[in-house]
Image (spheres, helix red, strand yellow):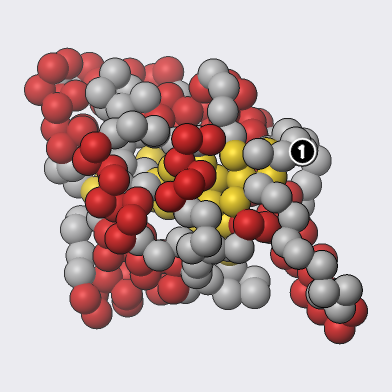
């Protein structure tokens, strides 16, 4: 992948709890992929979140030590829970120099909502929904409005939850082992960012043929 250098902010449920939370491994691999390709990325997770607490109870400080020693290229910070005006102000500062923000479904709903609301022509937001058939995520999936986000990247089984709630052009399907998912997410996010920039450049002539929106896209270029 060859692309301009972008500043990524990734809000994840947990980067520590690999065994408790399979997407943690995907996000670790995503961070490594971005670092290897000259991208600037920082991962943020809420301090004291249940997944990380569970991992720390099971493994102790070894869980944090493993993340630091085995994944030294990852920039990772815990952040305090915020709400209301304090949350909005903090997000404004945190995302001021970012090009795009990825939000994992299941992080604090207010945070996810406001990240989506901050979507702008030159600041892109992507909702990432990788876990199917997890009951605790169903309320998040149906309460969070996906339409403000630049794109939604999700598992094939989660697509029905988003159909009709956002443009089909914004739905991107990813599936496969963690290494494949990490690469697919990175490439889909950058392709979305670059395509949006191109659409802005071509705005005067875009959308004049009255055609229907294309089907859901797979990250590898296929259709869902």
Task: Report the number of numbered marks.
Answer: 1
- Residues 7 and 21: in front is 21
Using residue 95 as the reference point, say whether residue 20 is left or right of it: left
From the top left corner, tell me how far across and down residue 126 is, in percent. 52, 55
User: Residue 179, relative to residue 216: is it above or below?
Assistant: above
User: Residue 31, relative to residue 62: is it above or below?
Assistant: below
Q: Residue visible at 64% across and 71% down?
A: 122
- Residues 25 and 132: in front is 132
Q: Residue visible at 58% across and 56% down?
A: 151
Residue at label 1?
221
Using residue 69 as the reference point, say whether residue 186 is left or right of it: right
Q: Is residue 128 visible?
A: no
User: Residue 90, relative to residue 184: is it above or below?
Assistant: below
Q: Which corner quadrant of the image does residue 177 belong to?
A: top right
Using residue 148 as the reference point, say whether residue 169 is left or right of it: right
Q: Residue visible at 30% across and 60% down?
A: 143
Using residue 192 as the reference point, say whether residue 166 is left or right of it: left
Secondary structure under the numbered disc 1 in the rendered image: loop
Check the picture and name the quadrant holding the N terminus.
top right
Q: Which residue is farthest left? A: 57
From the top left corner, tell me how far across and down residue 201 is, in percent. 84, 74
From the top left corner, tell me how far across and down residue 39 is, in percent. 64, 44
């Amino acid at each position: 992948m060859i692309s301009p250098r972008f500043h990524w902010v990734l809000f994840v449920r947990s980067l520590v709890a690999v065994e408790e939370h399979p997407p943690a491994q995907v996000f670790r691999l995503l961070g490594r992929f971005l670092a290897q390709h000259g991208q600037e990325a920082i991962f943020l997770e809420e301090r004291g979140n249940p997944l990380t607490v569970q991992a720390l109870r099971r493994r102790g400080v070894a869980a944090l030590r493993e993340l630091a020693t085995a994944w030294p290229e990852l920039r990772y910070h815990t952040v305090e829970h915020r709400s209301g005006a304090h949350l909005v102000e903090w997000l404004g500062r945190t995302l001021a120099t970012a090009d795009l923000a990825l939000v994992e479904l299941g992080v604090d709903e207010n945070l996810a909502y406001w990240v989506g609301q901050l979507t702008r022509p030159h600041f892109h937001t992507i909702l990432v929904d990788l876990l199917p058939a997890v009951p605790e995520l169903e309320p998040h999936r149906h309460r969070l409005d996906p339409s403000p986000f630049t794109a939604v990247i999700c598992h094939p089984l989660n697509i029905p939850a988003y159909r009709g709630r956002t443009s089909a052009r914004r739905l991107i399907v990813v599936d496969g082992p963690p290494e494949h998912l990490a690469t697919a997410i990175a490439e889909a996010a950058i392709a979305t960012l670059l395509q949006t920039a191109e659409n802005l450049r071509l705005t005067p002539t875009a959308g004049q043929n009255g055609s229907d929106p294309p089907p859901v896209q797979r990250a590898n270029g296929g259709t869902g």
